[in-house]
Amino acid sequence: MTDCICYGGKGGVGKTTCAAATGLSLAAAGKRTLVVSTDPAHSLSDSIEADIGPEPTELKLAGALEPETNHAAELWAVEIDPETQQERYEKMARALAADLRSAGISLSDAEIEQLFSGGMPAGSDEIAALDLLVEYVDSGEWDVVVLDTAPTGHTLRLFDMPGVMGRALETAQSLRGQARRIGSAARTAMFGPLSMFGTDGDDESLESFQARLERARDVLVDPARTEFRVVLIPEAMAIAESERLVTRLREADVPVERVIVNRVLEDPHEGCPRCQSRQARHEERLAEIHETFPELEVVTLPDLEGEAQGPESLSVIAERLPS
């Protein structure tokens, strides 16, 4: 089975760096690995220093992260294009509503709200991420999928989306049933906008899409397959937001085993009072993090004095991260 490692947290704490370093380390250890970025503000390409598009692209390893085994290192990366996916889902939802009205079906305000609330079109990038995650996991092409999620709010919507979309799809199914009762003309009108869920004329296509979202949730909450790692930096606001994130993830039954504390100053310059003070502050914050998350493993990553980009910098991070 394909395993999943998810990185999430406050914006700007280094989630992409951790995901990229983990992907490189896993690939170097002989694991067929795919790194997926769901963050609309993609920086995975910059971190790995490679051209990455909306389709999985195979990358080449070099330098310190060449394969550690006799197997060839296999690493792919993909940046999900939220704009394209949003257009896809928004078009489907609006076409569905228009065709239902043209077929003479009355849409209540509550039904319209269920069709569009939380997922269409506002959350279409999260829907796309879930849909594609199932595709990547079920393809069998990779041993591990490393998910670089968007900042906290988007990440939580990602885990809420199967339930939200489940309600919307149930409403759509009810409305489709009404269309069946008023004749074949209405049914034909319905299949056009719903064709994205499966082949034309496939009565089970809507249910199939809902099943994929439910499967995505099953994968994300399976502790035998998935681990969510919360990334933060040694600052009060990041600690508070990470505590809220861990709480919400646990409420959603998402397995969380460790927190990753990035950019910790470990070796300050001698004769630099400001550096010494910063190190002392970081030590205080680390003690607070251990107290806040007593049941989680705390992994610290060094401050590299700048963004970690390219194999050489990422190898320093990869050495400290669990595979």
Image (cartoon, rainbow, N blue to C red):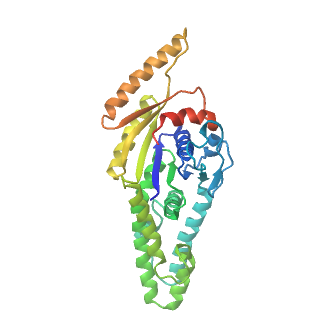
Quadrant containing the N terminus is bottom left
Could you tell me which residue is drawn at 46 percent across and 73 percent down?
Answer: 208
94 lies above or below 189 = above
Q: Quadrant of residue 56?
A: bottom right
Give coordinates of residue 116: x percent, y percent: 48, 65
Q: Position of residue 150 (x, y in %)?
A: 52, 47
Residue 108 in view of the camera: no
Residue 55 appears anywhere in the view:
yes
Residue 186 to residue 280: above or below: below
Which x, y percent locates residue 87? 60, 63
Count of number-bearing discs? 0
Question: Which residue ends up furthest to the top in the rendered image?
Answer: 271
Q: Quadrant of residue 300?
A: top left
Furthest residue toward bottom: 183
Left or right: 243 as drawn, with respect to 311: left
Q: Residue at x 47, y 82 (%)?
A: 203
